Amino acid sequence: MSSEVVEDEISSFFESSPPLKNMDGIIKKLNRFIKLNSSSRGENHQSDWREEDRVCVTSGGTTVPLEQRCVRYIDNFSSGNRGAASTENFVKAGYAVIFLYRRGTCQPYCRSLPDDPFLECFEFRDKRNIQVHASHLEAVKLAVMDHQAAVADGRLLKLPFSTIYEYLQMLRLIATALKDVGSCSMFYLAAAVSDFYVPWESMTEHKIESGSGPLDIRLAQVPKMLSILRSNWAPNAFCISFKLETDSKILIEKATKALQKYKVHAVVASELSTRKEEVVVVSSSGNVVVRRDCDKPDESIVEYNLIRLIVDRHSTYIKESHS
Ligand code: PAZ
């Protein structure tokens, strides 16, 4: 498909999307966050270029509404665990992170809390007061401390999405806002983005009636935004995309094709059942298997070594772009 056809498809996707709610508020938050991470550091730290690094981490799955006044939608498996764990490690590495996440999925600093932390971590001290249960005290203290430090330091901005329409519009806003940051910005696209959707104009307004027998729905292909992100939205940003397959035999081939087609700097390939154990970073300099190491507390998640590798590659990229 020619690049003009892709661009036309992308334009008509955005033109026919329902407008993003609170777009002005999101733009304000984004600009404030990006400015904060330039002005507060810049002058006194001119030689320390690491402090200007920013990454947009996308996380969780996009929904595909079936009705305009949405009652039903198509969803996917993504828990948001990878995005949340990666965000924590990027903050640790000195990045300012824009965390574009699916509402209700895993959040940074909350991964070691129980599923229902509010109800499970607290108990009554007496009739009027509650306290953290001793068994969760350390985990809650650490989560609150690390989260507050990241936010107070201006290192974490969280922006939620639900639908494919919201996700892609917000990604475009972020990319546009980060355009001037150039090579110091990174896109780490770990979200599981729907490949198919129901175009807004062909969607029924009201709840689909259930009395009229089997349901036929025609899903259109979601235009691949990676190409336009690379060529127009943020051409100088370092860009990491992700590829998930259930058949390990085709995984590396697919990831290599994506690397070449979208000209991203690396593709992180994982297989559904082993995605928490290992990933393969596919890039033009070869493929690197990254595993978790259960014997070392920090390295017990695959994202620890993954982010170290990605940060290292990003540093080299920035140096090369500045030389
Ligand atoms: O969100 P999670 O931790 O359950 O899974 C992460 C992941 C597998 C969704 C991510 O690493 C990924 O590969 N995202 C891209 C999926 C794809 O569209 O191929």
Image: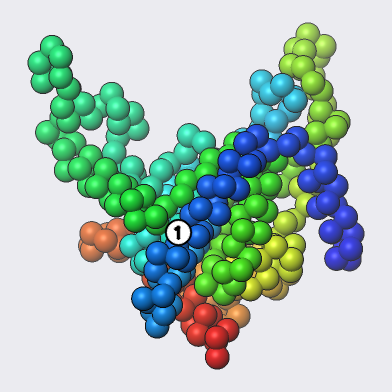
Tell me where residue 18 appears, x and y as whole percent: 75, 35
- What's the residue type where badge 1 is placed? Leu
Tell me where residue 224 appears, x and y as whole percent: 74, 56
- Residues 192 and 199: in front is 199
- Decide: is 75 above or below 171: above
Tell me where residue 131 appears, x and y as whole percent: 15, 27
Q: Residue at x 81, y 52 (%)?
A: 10
**Residue 218 seen by the camera:** yes
Q: Residue furthest top?
A: 211
- Residues 243 and 240: in front is 240
Locate the N terminus and report the quarter of the image it occupies: bottom right
Q: Residue at x 30, y 34 (%)?
A: 114
Query: Along the horizontal axis of the image, is 236 left or right of 287?
Result: right
Tell me where residue 44 appears, x and y as whole percent: 36, 76
Which residue is disc 1 drawn over? Answer: 36
Q: Residue at x 47, y 38 (%)?
A: 105
- Residues 176 and 36: in front is 36
Label 1 near ligand 1 (CB < 8 Å): no
Query: Along the horizontal axis of the image, is 62 left or right of 134?
Result: right
**Residue 82 seen by the camera:** no
Quarter-wise, where is residue 284 in the image?
bottom right
